[in-house]
Amino acid sequence: MTPQTSSIPAADLSARRLPSYSHLHELMRRFQVKDLVNVDAESFMRTLDEFEQLDDHEMEGFAGRDKQHPIYVKFHWGHRHDFGEFSKPGRMGNHHIMVMATFIDELKAIGQSLAGKRVLDIGCWTGGTSLLLAAMGAEVVAVEEVKKYAECTRYLAHAFDMRSIEVRHMSLYECITDEFQDAFDLVLFPGVLHHLSDPKLALRITFNCLTDGGSCLIETLSFDHDAEIVARRALELAPDPAREPWGWNWLLFTPGTLMKTMEGVGYTISHPCTVMDGRTFVVGRRDRHTDLWRAGLSVRTIR
């Protein structure tokens, strides 16, 4: 039976703070200019400036830029990075820290240490989640489909000598080779699901990537509805459709149907999901590898 959801107003969560937030925030302070290892401060700042100048659709393999979301073409910092001598605000600010603190404190899915854990970080953007996971002790494989962001994350990992981070420029849908099968203790899947055209296939791929007993931590844009609606076209809910073209946000789940879809691809959901400010946090556990309902699957041969 799928657990019920628990809803937390963002204002309440902010007021009491997540106990782990300050700890995680402090971990991120190890990535400052004074902590650089493989590059000097001058070349570091120059390289970051060069990333910020990137405005290129061809490097992403696009035929043109008109039908692509600007974030895929022009470089934008995704996460806030405090480099000590200067900082990059990022479109999502410290959201990555809040996400991890929520999984620690609200869903009790992980502890503050990930030492000895192998983690697949899906959609690493400009590396905030990957650096945080590594600072928590994890061995990280970071997957990012946008080349400029994969290169940025790779550069940051190199600059701070974070050898526990391996960055792959690839799509989640390509994580089906032998090296990804049954390979990870944890899959972190934050802020990505609503950007995908085939979420059920994506969820099955994450399931296959886990070891038995492993967990997938999902945070995604969602919407509340009492009816049994699987998903809703995200364009209908965009505050400014002109800025959110079709193909940026594809489908939004209700919390309940997200959990049911996860169960449908094999996950066990044993803890109520948390809903906060229009976003759903849910943990799926892979008890053992099982088959799934294959009728209508876009990739019939998916493991």
Image (tube, rainbow, N blue to C red):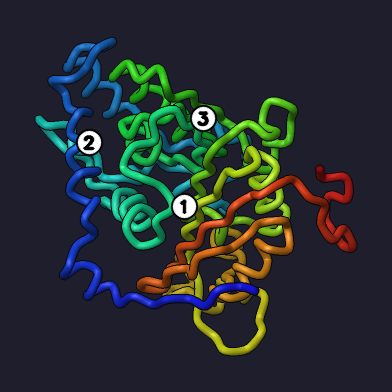
Query: Disc 2 on helix, strand or loop?
Result: helix
What's under tag 2, amino acid-wise?
Leu
What's under tag 1, amino acid-wise?
Pro
Q: Residue at x 31, y 53 (%)?
A: 101
Query: Disc 3 on helix, strand or loop?
Result: strand
Alpha carbon distance from label 2 to label 3: 19 Å
Q: Is residue 276 left or right of residue 203?
A: left
In the foreground, 110 or 68: 110
Q: Is residue 115 left or right of residue 230?
A: left
Viewer-nearest of discs 2 and 1:
2
Query: Going from the N terminus, do you reach mark 3 or mark 1 first?
Result: 3
In the foreground, 151 or 191: 191
Q: Which mark is residue 141?
A: 3
In the foreground, 25 or 211: 211
Q: Residue beneath label 2, please?
A: 27
Q: Residue at x 25, y 45 (%)?
A: 80
- x, y percent for residue 236: 55, 79
